[in-house]
Amino acid sequence: MSDPSTTTTNTTGGPAGATGATGDRSVEAFGYRQELKRSLSFTDLLVYGLIFMVPIAPFGIFGSVFQGSGGMVALAYAIGGLAMAFTAASYSQMSRAFPMAGSVYTYAGRGIAQPVGFIAGWMILLDYVLVPALLYLIAAIAMNSILTTVPVWVWLVGFVVLNTVVNYFGIEFTARVNKVMLVAELVVLAIFLVIGVVALASGEGRGFDFSPVYNSDTFSLELVFGAVSIAVLSFLGFDGISTLAEENRDSARSIGKAMIAALALAGTLFIVQTWIAALLVPDPDTLIAEGDAAGTAFYDAAAVAGGAWLSTLTAVATAVAWGFANSLVAQAATSRLLFAMARDRQLPGFLRKVHPTRRVPVNATFLVAAVSLVLGLYMESREDGITLLSTLVNFGALSAFLLLHVSVVVHFVVRQKSRNWWLHLAVPVIGFAILAYVVYNAQVAAQELGFVWLVVGLVLMGVLLATGRKPEIRAEQGL
């Protein structure tokens, strides 16, 4: 924790205090120094969120969601988007109350109590720390399937090194790369959608119908919500925008607005592309019965629409989007979470080091790269590596989101006596109920491994408290 009595200068050029030029409370108002560089606009935040979610994310897990939903893949994504909308609304409220890096760790810690914040941060680490390894592994396997002479581990190392270098050069450079990658992904998606619609209109596939949204022969709530627990993997990332709160140069409201906008745009794209792909699946009954072990269901659908070249294009786009664009922002978000927890003495102090000129949490960035490399190489040697990482990532994120919703009610309704019953009570309660049902219907392996991770976190928290490493969370100055 930085000494709040230290004289600093905030981003508006004045002395550290409670507010900046926009009228928002600055990070100094909570007892910290402004160390990260405030340079990101609303557009940068929106692009960051879209890249983190990956507009073409369903390409890689389409087969699993199709099987899990009994073919109602568009419905699974619609419900997942609705669930995440309530979560985004809760994030929006807490990001305005506490405009700091740390995401749900900060919100639950200050909104409820610091021990709860630690557990929230610990659970979401399953998402933030493991997701880069998952993305690198999926991308490396995809590239190996295209260029079989290059081993998976070589692709994996290459993606890790490339992203680490880009993140090291600073958040502004990362933001510029994000914009280029977003345009490229949207172009590929547009090509698939146009060719797919033309193919369906020409009689390819099953033609236009509503079976990807509702099929009376296979529908059940348990079935669909089980598929939602897989589909939400595509939505994870909008919350990463909150980790850039101390690098946002605009009003604190921009964080919440960017999260909601990114979620709405991505959700719409997910529903449309999976609807069209579901109608193009060559053998839907076999896919539902036997699954998609090779992970090629979407590419097979693309081949029906446009031939081998479109199948290859969508496969390459998936590899680049997951292995470079998505992993790039995932590494950035994870390093900010580690930085925030280390600053509060909940993780080793070396993780709070900020590069003096590039203004990025450099040690945290390198640690994420190292963990991603080791985990990626290990999981590559396991047959269930991708499945294991996926289930852990989803369970960790959803568990942390549950605590986020609780923090909104406690902070605003209980402490602040808010009477905004919709945003501060109804929204978090509904969001909590939906996510709890999704977690309940998640795979047993995810529940078991997630519980083990929770127990380890509780033990670690006990050690931190016993050794006097409870963070000195200060109330907002002047209140």
Image: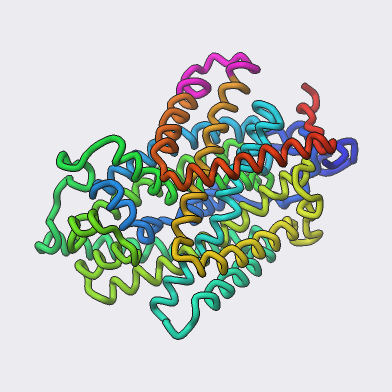
**Seen in the image, is 113 located left or right of residue 327?**
right
Q: Residue at x 29, y 63 (%)?
A: 297
Query: Foreground residue, 359 or 427?
Result: 427
Q: Vertically, is 359 above or below 235?
A: below
Q: Is residue 258 visible?
A: no
Using residue 222 as the reference point, say whether residue 150 is left or right of it. right
The magenta span reads 413-426
Q: In the image, is 392 to the left or to the right of 118?
A: left
Quadrant of the snapshot with the N terminus: top right
Q: State the image coordinates of residue 400 (x, y, percent, origin top left).
A: 56, 38
Q: Vertical placement of 191 versus 144: above or below?
A: above
Q: Quadrant of the C terminus?
A: top right
457 falls in the magenta region? no
Q: How many marks?
A: 0
Residue 4: horizontal and vertical position, in percent?
Answer: 86, 36
Say which quarter of the image contains residue 465.
top right
Q: Residue at x 52, y 33 (%)?
A: 402
- Picture quarter containing residue 196? bottom left
Residue 26, relative to residue 238: is it above or below?
above
User: Looking at the picture, how far across and down is residue 418, in whole percent?
Assistant: 58, 16
In the picture shown, does residue 292 fall above or below 217?
below
Q: Can I make out residue 434 in this image?
A: yes
Nearer to me, 248 or 230 = 230
| Residue shown at the point (41%, 56%) measured from the top left | 55
Q: Residue at x 24, y 70 (%)?
A: 303
